[in-house]
Image (cartoon, rainbow, N blue to C red):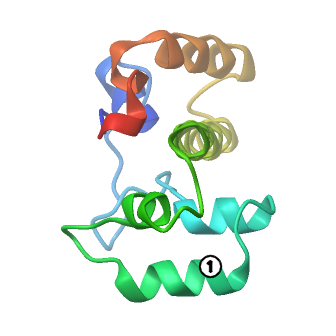
Amino acid sequence: MGNSFLDFLKHRGLLRQRRSAEGDNDLEFREVLGAIALRHGMLTPEQVDEVLLMADQQRPFHLIALELGFLNEQQINRLQKCQLLEEALQIGVGAILAEQLEPQVMLRELNAYFESADTQGIAGE
């Protein structure tokens, strides 16, 4: 996948390069695809468990869910876009609360991010 919204904001000079003590940026967040699908009723807990038992680095969650017929390509693409949107919103809210961005700026940049090449063609990755 392309750069995160956090990287996008840093590249545009809108966020400071602040790091937490653990070395991970304290504004980063990404919910796993299976959790999003489960939360929205697209998968059952049993289906998520079955996919997780088979998932590894060579065969990620979304490919196994597709192979098993639990999700189709359009659903996976939408889930990945929602995953990206949820992550970007969490980063944006964190930046607003940390007084690094104004809400209007965050919304403008969120729109620019989703229009950028970094967020296109997600399902193919």
Q: Is residue 98 above or below residue 31?
A: above
Q: How many marks?
A: 1
Identify the residue shown where x is 48% and y is 18%.
Answer: 113
Tell me residue 7's x, y (percent).
Answer: 34, 33
**On screen, 81 above or below 31?**
above
Task: Identify residue type, mark 1.
Answer: Gln
User: Residue 68 location, x and y as percent?
Assistant: 48, 68
Is residue 16 visible in the rendered image? The answer is no
106 left or right of 55 in image: right
Q: Please report the residue visible at 42 percent of the width from the left and 25 percent of the height from the top.
A: 119
- Is residue 9 shown above or below 22? above
The residue closer to the viewer here, 73 or 105, is: 73
Q: Position of residue 85 (x, y in %)?
A: 61, 37
Camera-side residue of 108 and 123: 123
Q: For the N terminus, which image quadrant?
A: top left
Q: Is residue 118 left or right of residue 82?
A: left
Q: Quadrant of residue 96?
A: top right
Q: Quadrant of the C terminus?
A: top left
Farthest-out residue, left? 58
Residue at the image point whose x is 70% and y is 83% from the top: 45
Q: Which residue is mark 1?
A: 47
Q: Is residue 18 above or below residue 24?
A: above
Name which quarter of the figure residue 6 lies in: top left
Q: Residues within 10 Å of mark 1 (few under 14, many from 20)?
A: some
Is any atom of residue 60 visible in this view? yes
Q: Secondary structure at mark 1?
A: helix
Rendering coords of residue 122 (x, y %): 40, 33
Determine the image quadrant of residue 42.
Answer: bottom right
